[in-house]
Image (cartoon, grey):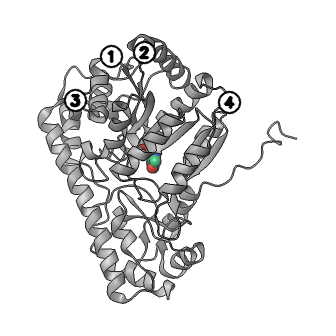
Amino acid sequence: SSYFANVPQAPADGILKLSVLSRADTNSTKVDLGVGAYRDDSGKPWVLPVVRKAEQQLAADPQANHEYLGVGGLPALTQGAQKLIFGADSEAIKQQRVYSIQTISGTGANMVAAVFLKQFKQPADAAVYISKPTWGNHRSIFETAGHVVREYRYCNYTTLGLDIQGMLDDLRAAPRGQIILLHACAHNPTGIDPTTEQWQQIADVMQERSHFPLFDCAYQGFATGDVTRDAYAIRLFVSRGFELLVAQSFAKNMGLYGERTGCLHAVTALPAVLPQVSSQLNRLSRATISTAPAYGAKIAGTVLQDAELYEEWLGSMEMMSRRIKKMRNLLRDKLVALGTPGSWDHVSQQIGMFSFTGLSKQKVDRLREEYHLYMTDDGRISVAGLNSGNIDYVAKAIDAVVR
Ligand code: PLP
C-alpha cells in the first residue's frame, strides 16, 4: 500500500497535452498553432534585440553577482513595471497609493493575488468571477487558493464577438462585492476585447455593484502594438477611483517566457493602508518563493530604465503585433478567396496572440489527425504561429475540413 494511494489523478492540462502530441509528430507539414509564444516569419522563437543588448550589458558588468534580490524584488523592475502599467505621470503613483511586488511571471502574480484575496477579501464569502471562456489556468489558480469560482458571459459563440449584454447582466446579477477577473487586453483564448465605450459600461456596473477588479495583463503592447492603448482599461478603472490588483507578465511582450518575470500591483484608495497591503504581499511572497528570480528581472529592469533600450523595445512590440495582424488578415483573405463556407471576419477583427476560429472539436481533431495542424480543442489558434511559409497550407486545411 502507498501513502499516496488516495491521491486522485489530476485532469490533464489541454495545452501541455497538445504540445506533447505536437512534439511527437515528425511530419514535415506539421504546423503548431497551440502554444502561446511569438514566432518570427520563419517559425522560430525570437529573442528581442533589446534583450540581447541588456544581457550583454549584464555579462560585461564586473560588479554583477548572483545574490538574492530583496523581498519585494528588483526595484528597477517593479518601478519600471509600475510606470508601464499605470503611466509615468500616474496620479496614483504620485500619491503613493501603488505597491508593486515582483512575482513568478503572470502566473505567480495571479497566485499571490489569489492567496492574498482569500485571506482578506470583503465580504469573506465573495466568489471570483472569470470570463466564459478564459485562460485555462485561471480556474485552477483561484480554486487552488480556496475560492469559489463562477463565470460571467463573455464570448458570443455565434458571432465570435463580445456578448457585452450578457457580461453586463451577469455582473449586475452577481451579489455585491464580488471579485471580477478581467483581461486587461488581448483576451485569451478569444482575442475579443471590449471597446473603450464597453469598458466604461463595465466600470459603471462594477461601481454600482461595488465589485473588486483584478486585472490580468499578460499582453500589454501585443494587442495594438501600443503599450498605452493596451493599458486603457486599467487606467480607466484607476481614474474612476477603484481599488484594484493587476497581475503583469513580461513573458510575451519582452519574450522572457522561461525567465518568469512579472509583477503584482496593488492600488489602494488611501496611502495610509498601503503599508498594510505591502507588508502582507511581502509576507505571502516570502512564504512561497522567499525571493524572486533575478536574471529576467535584471534584463527587464535594464530595458525599462534605459531610455534608448525602452524606445527600441516599444518598436519591437509594434513589429510583433504588426506581423500578427498581417497574418490575421492574410488568413481571412485566403479563406474568403477559397470560398470557405462561413464568415471569417472575426479572424481579422480579434486582437492579440490568439484567434477563436469557431472550428468545432471534431474539426480540430481532423485537422490534427489528417493535416498535422495543431490547435486547442476549443478552436483557438496562436496567430503568431502562422507565417508566409505555412499560411497557404493552413488555409487549405481549414477549408478542407469546413466543407
Ligand atoms: N494570464 C493570461 C491570460 C495568459 O494568457 C498567460 C499566459 O499564457 C498568463 C497569465 C501567464 O503567463 P506567464 O506565467 O508565463 O507570465
Amino acid type of the residue tagged 4 in the rendering: Asp
Q: Ligand 1 closer than 8 Å to the CB at disc 2? A: no
**Sooner in the amino-acid sequence: mark 3 or mark 2:** 3
Between disc 3 and disc 4, whose residue precedes? 3
State the SS at label 2.
helix
Q: Of label 2 and label 4, which has the lower sequence position?
A: 4
Q: Are marks 2 and 4 in contact (CB under 8 Å)?
A: no
Provide the secondary structure element on which disc 3 rests. loop
> Which residue is the site of mark 1?
96
Crowd class of label 3 (few under 14; some 14 to 19; many from 20; radius 10 Å): some
What's the amino acid at mark 2?
Answer: Leu
Circle 1 SS class: loop
Query: Ligand 1 near label 3 (Cβ, under 8 Å)?
Result: no
Q: Which residue is mark 3?
A: 88
Q: Do the residues under discs 3 and 2 have CB atoms within 8 angstroms?
A: no
Residue at disc 1, CB closer than 8 Å to ligand 1: no
Residue in view at x 38 percent, y 69 percent: 347
Circle 4 sits on which residue?
125
Residue 73, given in percent of the width and then of the height, sits at 38, 23
Front in this rendered view, residue 347 or 92 = 92
Q: Earlier in the sequence, mark 1 or mark 4?
A: 1
| Sequence-first tag of 2 and 1 | 1
* Residue 242 visible (yes or no): yes
In the image, taking residue 52 as reference, residue 70 lies left or right, namely: right
